[in-house]
Amino acid sequence: MAARAYWQGQIRLALVSIPVEIYTATKSGAAISFRQIHEPTGKPIHYEKVVTGVGPVDTDEIMKGYEVEKGSYVLLDQDEIDAVKLESKKTLELTQFVDAHEIDVLYYDKPYFVVPTDDLAEEAFIVLREALRRTKKVGLGQLALRGREYVVSLKPCGRGMVLETLRYADEVRKAQGYFRDIPDDKPDEELLELAESLIAKKTGKFDAGEFHNRYVDALQDLIARKRKSKGGKIVEDAEETAPRRGSNVVDLMAALKESLEKPGSGGAKGKGSGGSKAAAKKRAAG
């Protein structure tokens, strides 16, 4: 395998230990990076690590410090931090199993591929994978990665498994504070049916390749035009209609009906709609 393992250790289930490796399952997508530039000279801005009253310092003179009181720090070497003993640095013990739907989407953080370390680990790995698949459960445990201990979930993924780091409860904001002002009203039945018909019309199978980062394309186009203009300022006024406040049932009804009648607004490549489209047309006609 060409990639380098992000972590190596073992998954432990009761008395069974399975040597595994995990690999990052995602990568950075296309992005435009900018440097800060000193406009009069056109030269890039640099940053130096500076101590008040001393000036610039070398990186080998820098330690990590924890502030115990104002202006007073406990200094630690990286070696001391790395030496902290934590069993989850090398062992992921599965301590609980839950239904996948019980984990709120807000808790999921980052996915990793999990594979057996060698041929000897494959049998136990496959047994655990298929047991999770048959029971439709997700395994939970804690794992230390790069200086932090995470709650993690483990579930089947094709021939392998996927481990996902989860956020702790105190890292997730409570939704009630944001949603409390939304009225608990029952929607108009006809409006609801029109909205369901529009959803059915646009339903299809998920294909990540259907989506593209248009912002990167727009920035690249701006940079190309900026080069041609020899430094001239390029600002385009985007005329966007501000959404009207309040509820207008007549306008909403008209907008939903017009959306359903609009051609070419079906699901991605027309996949996965079939009978739903027919049902949608029947309801819209009624």
Image (cartoon, rainbow, N blue to C red):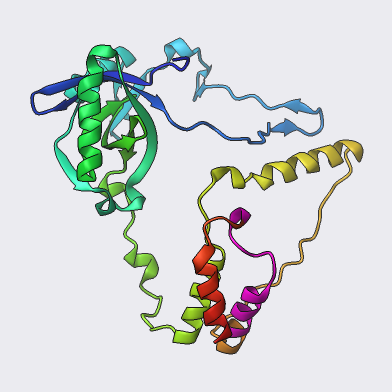
Say if 30 sits above or below 196 in the image.
Answer: above
Within the image, what quadrant is residue 121 found in? top left
Residue at x-position 35% and y-position 29%: 159
In the image, 3: left or right of 84?
Answer: right
Please state the extent of the stretch shown in magenta in the rendering.
253-269
Q: Which residue reaches farthest left? A: 15
Number of dots carrying numbers: 0
Task: Give how far across and how far down residue 127 sits, in percent.
Answer: 20, 29
Q: Which residue reaches farthest right? A: 229
Q: Quadrant of the C terminus?
A: bottom right
Residue at x-position 68% and y-position 27%: 45
Task: Give how far across and how far down residue 114 sits, in percent.
Answer: 33, 27
Q: Quadrant of the N terminus?
A: top left
In the image, 12: left or right of 231?
Answer: left
Residue at x-position 56% and y-position 55%: 271
Residue at x-position 80% and y-position 28%: 42
Within the image, what quadrant is residue 251 found in? bottom right
